[in-house]
Amino acid sequence: MSGMLGITGVTRMMMQMPKVVKMGLSKTAASLGRVKPQHGRMFLHQKSLARLPIPPLQQTLYRYLLSVEPLLSKEDFETTKKVVEDFGKPNGVGQRLQMALVKRAKKLDNWLSQWWLSVAYLEFRSPVVVNVSPGIVCPRENINSESDQLKFASKFISGVLDFKHLIDTNSLPVDQMGGQPLCMDQYYKVLAACRIPGPRKDDLVFYPPNKPDAPKHIIVAHKNHFYTVDVMDKEGVPLTLSQLYSQLKFVLEASTQPEIPVGLLTTAHRNTWGKVYKRLNKDPTNAKSFDNIKRAIFLLCLDSSSSQTEQNFSAHVARQALYGGGSGSNSGNRWYDKTIQFFVSPNGGTGLTYEHSGAEGPPIISLVDHTLAYAHSIADDFNAMTVDAPAPKKLNFNLDLDALDTIEEAKQEIDSLAGDLQLTILPFKHYGKDFPKSQKLSPDAFIQIAIQLTYYKIYGRSAATYESASLRKYQYGRTDTIRSASIASNAFCKAMEESGTKPSEKAMLFRKAILSHKEYTNLAINGDGIDRHLLGLKLIAIEQGENVPDLFMDTAYTQSSHFNVSTSQVPAKHDLVMCFGPVVPDGYGICYNPRQNHLNFAVSAFNTSPETDSDVFAKRLSESLLEIRDVLESAPPTAKL
């Protein structure tokens, strides 16, 4: 996050989680995370949602200069001012591109969405593992035997199907943010969805529930075997827990020895995997297996035991969620093109990996919260007399020598990536979102400024920082960027490092930084962010066959979109944490779930970068959070920010 491409591909991003409407839920149901149906109302506001606007050119250029100033030297900033002035001059290149972008917006429901899908995801050629696909670490389950593993997995399947029914009947409550309804289209792109590799560009396919051939099966992976498993009868009625348990038990008993890890192909460079896929897909057996996988509702990985290489159990599970733990663990027991794949381990580790192309975080977290609540509340009805379901069917693959060689290369690459990725899970126990609220401060802005302070403490400067902002108040909206490093945050960080600054002044500067962050956030979620607008101007120039304008070749643009710190807030009803890799080689990936009384952080970095260290960052982040608390407690709270 998760986390996930860049304006260097376009830096991988995950969306800020909006509040979910809770009308109609009982207090118990809401606290558990299960959703009460609102039949047929899921798309009630869809047609009335506004189209994504295009901000005024001069507004974007002015705010762009404000955002790059804390990142540049005075000399570089003066150079950038001249470049920006030239781009925005009357009848200049910027004005011409702005008019072309406005013309595009008049013809499309969302002028950005298809561009964003292509540039940020489908044209991204590096492996999706770590670089694109976030992992989610769920709370540890009480699993002590193979039977426990299958029972929990059966309940989990049942919970996903319960959530799917809400989608199928358009009964999900409409997500809201600030009292405004949000676009619900992404919920149709979570289940029964899959990325398809291509030699130069990938594709994304969906199998919506309103079609007569809507899928009724999932794929179950065990020891690198893949089985198609029916989870509904012919009428679309979900199987009972007893039936699901029998299906999963069949898979385990039929796959006692490891299979060739064909799933590792999905961890390869997209061009490499695309060429192999195109060739293998010509074989009817392979084509049938590929079709079963891409049509499946989701993929369930029944993992084997793996040695815990991390002292922290959550960090161990996070590695399973991000990349399967390596070729000697469960990396081959995955299919990373599948939008949703859950895993259940014999040691109680559970979670999921999701392929990011079709949806942001909120639909995924809604699914996870609902499913966990369902699994923990449903009765253990595994002894009921039921009719046998059709037996699971093994998916077969005819692999040529080139494919086998690619699998061997993928083993080395995933293990190299595993060795390079540094991952730290920080459960900050000293306070949660309760403390910022007691100070009348936004918890998200509070955490973002704490991250700014941490980076400044380590490196003595501010860094380009990405936080995702939801654009779902608009039709088919995805995300824009909150540039968390600001003139105000930079001033606060400097003051905190200067010994002569009074606590009252530090507190005042902190509140100014919070206010600046909130103002930028409001601009971004209301379509007035700068990053997607600038991207649109750049893409429209390329589309028209023009040279890329000097603005996008300037040092400031490169530096300010090289996100050394990529962040995402992922609030959830359960005590989980999302994790994702850095979006640049010398950067950090930071995801957080603000709980009432504690804060969950996942911090990632690459060992090959001598400048970064996720353990150090997490330790200094904890110190920053405590220092900020001390500063604020020395000064009385003011108006709510």
Image (cartoon, rainbow, N blue to C red):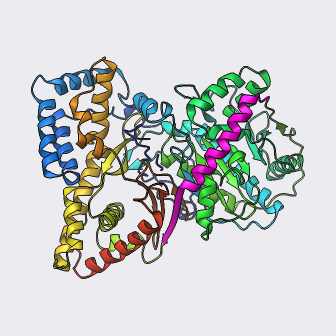
**Residue 218: x percent and y percent?**
73, 40
Q: Left or right of 516: which side holds 542? A: right
Q: How many marks?
A: 0
**Residue 600: x percent and y percent?**
48, 66
Residue for point 34% across, 72% down? 624
Is residue 414 located in the magenta-colored stretch of the structure?
yes
Helix, strand or loop for the magenta stretch, by majority: helix
Q: Quadrant of the C terminus?
A: bottom left
Residue for point 55% across, 41% down? 128
Let me know if residue 298 appears in the view.
Answer: no
Residue for point 72% across, 68% down? 142
- The extreme bottom residue here reads 634
Residue for point 44% across, 36% down? 120
- Start-end of magenta stretch: 398-427
Let me know if residue 444 appears in the view.
Answer: yes
- The extreme left residue here reads 90
Q: Nearer the viewer, residue 172 or 2?
A: 2
Q: Left or right of 45: which side holds 319? A: right
**Residue 213: x percent and y percent?**
70, 26
Residue 315, quarter of picture: bottom right
Q: Nearer the viewer, residue 538 or 523?
A: 538
Q: Nearer the viewer, residue 58 or 262?
A: 262
- The extreme top residue here reads 545
Is residue 66 located in the magenta-colored stretch of the structure?
no
Q: Left or right of 133: which side holds 242? A: right
**Residue 95: x percent and y percent?**
17, 25
